Image: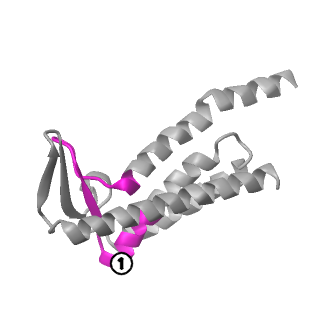
């Protein structure tokens, strides 16, 4: 298998793991916590059941079809990036995290018209597993683009 194929399989595995975990936990929340209720887990952590019709921090609430179109365009851009950079070290990781998070939230939007959020810290909006994957996907993408793997590529190009 070529490095590009290995990278694609890894991205696919991460994507699938994120989607399955996200949807399983959201289903558990929908089945066990009444919408609008909250359960204190620790003094600084609550489990809630809220419906978010917007994006991060409920921005653009009620955006409906426009948010779906934006998500599809962002996904196409991500897949294009991956296609062009699949052989870059670790490119599969942010691709899988971002794609899995986007798909997890898109499934909710298409099925329910809103995303299920359930993790709540004081002073912070509720979020979910897909949101965590997207956040870590962005951070790992920055690492892949500008961190040590990229620095090694630049050094190799300069030396060769």
Q: Quick one: label 1, few (<14), some, or many (20+) residues within 10 Å?
A: few
Residue 150 versus residue 48 in the image, above or below: above
The answer to whether any part of residue 70 appears in the image is no
Q: Quadrant of the C terminus?
A: top right
**Residue 150 makes an appearance in the image:** yes
Question: With 107 as the anchor, is 37 left or right in this view?
Answer: left
Q: Which residues are magenta?
A: 103-131
In-front residue for pair 106/158: 106
* Residue drawn at point x = 61 percent, y = 37 percent: 144
Q: Is residue 120 magenta?
A: yes
Horizontal and vertical percent position of residue 68: 41, 69
Up-down relation of residue 159 to residue 109 (above or below): above
Residue 19 x %, y %: 46, 63
Looking at the image, is 90 positioned above or below residue 22?
Answer: above
Q: Quadrant of residue 32?
A: bottom left
Q: Secondary structure at mark 1?
A: helix
């Amino acid at each position: 298998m070529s490095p590009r194929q290995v990278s694609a399989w890894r991205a696919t595995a991460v994507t699938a793991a994120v989607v399955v975990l996200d949807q399983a936990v959201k289903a558990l929340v929908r089945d066990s916590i009444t919408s609008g209720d909250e359960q204190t887990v620790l003094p600084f952590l609550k489990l809630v059941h809220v419906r978010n019709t917007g994006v991060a921090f409920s921005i653009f609430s009620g955006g409906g079809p426009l948010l779906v179109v934006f998500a599809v365009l962002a996904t196409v851009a991500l897949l294009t990036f991956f296609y062009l950079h699949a052989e870059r070290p670790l490119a599969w990781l942010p691709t899988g995290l971002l794609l899995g998070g986007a798909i997890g939230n898109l499934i909710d939007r298409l099925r329910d018209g809103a995303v299920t959020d359930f993790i709540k810290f004081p002073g912070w909006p509720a979020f979910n597993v897909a949101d965590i994957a997207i956040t870590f996907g962005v951070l790992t993408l920055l690492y892949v683009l500008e961190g040590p793997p990229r620095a090694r590529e630049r050094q190799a190009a300069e030396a060769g």
